[in-house]
Amino acid sequence: VTHKSTMAARKLVPLLDRVLVEKILPQAKSAGGVLLPESVASRTHEGRVLAVGPGRYSRDGERMPVSVQEGETVLLPEFGGNQVKVDGKELYLYRDEDILGVLKD
């Protein structure tokens, strides 16, 4: 996470079950060194969580925490999320339930 991304996360605090994500740009080359077509290289389905909201409330009034944490790498849906610009940087807000999973090393 770059310093500028961290600063952006401090300026935008997600509400309820929203998650602020910076998309990770895929490499333009394969592991074997083959250049990938622009259409493949432009798809970004991974992102780094910059900030999370406190969670939403259940019908009983109990807070339900968000299932991801700051710093995690997540798998994103092909479509969705709300694009926001903070200090000229493109970030995305997703609902917790729209994030497909957490990618572990």
Image: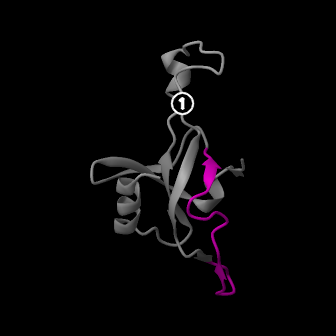
Drawn side of residue 48 relative to residue 62, left or right: left
- Camera-nearest residue between 65 and 58: 65
Q: Where is residue 87 in the image (x, y as percent from the top left)?
A: 27, 54
- Camera-nearest residue between 90 and 25: 25
Crowd band around label 1 with a 10 angstrom C-alpha radius: few (<14), some (14–19), many (20+): few
In the rendered view, tell whether residue 31 sits above or below residue 13: above
Residue 12 appears in which quarter of the rendering? Answer: bottom left
Q: Position of residue 28 (x, y in %)?
A: 52, 22
Kindly identify which residue carries mark 1: 43
Q: Where is residue 2 in the image (x, y as percent from the top left)?
A: 42, 52
Q: What stretch is highlighted in magenta?
A: 57-76
Drawn side of residue 105 relative to residue 82, left or right: right
Amino acid tagged 1: Arg
Drawn side of residue 1 relative to residue 55, left or right: left
Q: Does the magenta stretch include residue 4?
A: no
Residue 76 appears in which quarter of the rendering? Answer: top right
Q: Which residue does the image show at 48% across and 18% down from the upper left?
A: 38
Q: Which residue does the image show at 54% across and 13% down from the upper left?
A: 35
Q: Is residue 65 magenta?
A: yes
Magenta span main SS: loop
Considering every residue shown, the one lying at the far bottom of the view is: 61
- Camera-nearest residue between 59 and 14: 14
